[in-house]
Structure formats: C-alpha cells, structure tokens
Image (tube, rainbow, N blue to C red):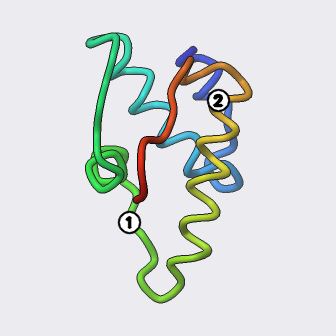
Amino acid sequence: MLRQVLQYHPQRERYAKRLGRYLTLQFHSHGVMRSSMATLLQQAGILPDKKNPGRTRQMIEGALLTLKTEGVNGKGRLIGQW
C-alpha cells in the first residue's frame, strides 16, 4: 500500500500522499487507530489554511475519499464532526 501512496503526485495529490503515508505506517504498526482530525493533520504534516477553511476541508475530505476508494486506508471511516 505504501508503494501505491508514494506514486501520488506531490503537488496535485499532496494531501492524499501525506495522509496516506501516515495512515499506512500507523495501520501497519497498530492495526486499528482512533484519532482526532487535529491529531491526524498534525501528524501528517498538514497545516490547515485558516483564511479558507472550507477549501481545506474539501481538499482533506477528497484526499480521504481517494484513499478509501483505492483501498489504502481499508475500512477507515470518520466518526463525528471535525
């Protein structure tokens, strides 16, 4: 899975690449992970754009959807609001 994540384009798929790399390493180590969105973004090295939070949220949700459809994060799901 990590090989697939590393093939993402570093600019066009920046969030998917960062989130995918972090989630792949965490799932490999721990199997199941429960984390807040703030922790997930911080550990993945993503700084939210405070001037345009809607755009940032849209890009992050798109990245998570990409990872889910390509089977990178397995049965991962969002719980509650972020």
Mark 2 vs mark 1: which is more N-terminal? 1
Give residue 63's position: percent from left, percent from top.
Answer: 62, 46
Disc 1 packing (10 Å; few <14; some 14–19; many ≥20): few
Picture quadrant of residue 70: top right
- Per the rendering, the mark at residue 79 is none
Give residue 51's position: percent from left, percent from top.
Answer: 47, 89
Quarter of the image where the C terminus is located: bottom left
Q: Which residue is mark 1?
A: 47
**Image point (34%, 10%), residue name:** 31
Q: Which residue is mark 2?
A: 68
**Which one is in front in this view, the residue at disc 2 or the one at disc 1?**
2
Quarter of the image where the N terminus is located: top right
Q: Secondary structure at mark 1?
A: loop
Disc 2 packing (10 Å; few <14; some 14–19; many ≥20): some
**Image point (48%, 41%), residue name:** 78
**Residue type at numbered disc 1:** Leu
The CA span between labels 2 and 1 is 22 Å
**Image point (55%, 50%), residue name:** 15
**Residue type at numbered disc 2:** Lys
Q: Is residue 58 above or below residue 1?
A: below
- Toward the bottom, the furthest residue is 51
Q: Secondary structure at mark 2?
A: helix
Q: Is residue 15 above or below residue 57?
A: above
Give residue 24's position: percent from left, percent from top.
Answer: 44, 22
Marks 2 and 1 close (CB-CB < 8 Å):
no
Picture quadrant of residue 34: top left
Q: Is residue 33 above or below residue 20?
A: above
Q: Is residue 53 above or below residue 67?
A: below
- In the image, is 21 to the left or to the right of 56? left
- In the image, is 37 to the left or to the right of 68? left
- Toward the front, the furthest residue is 80
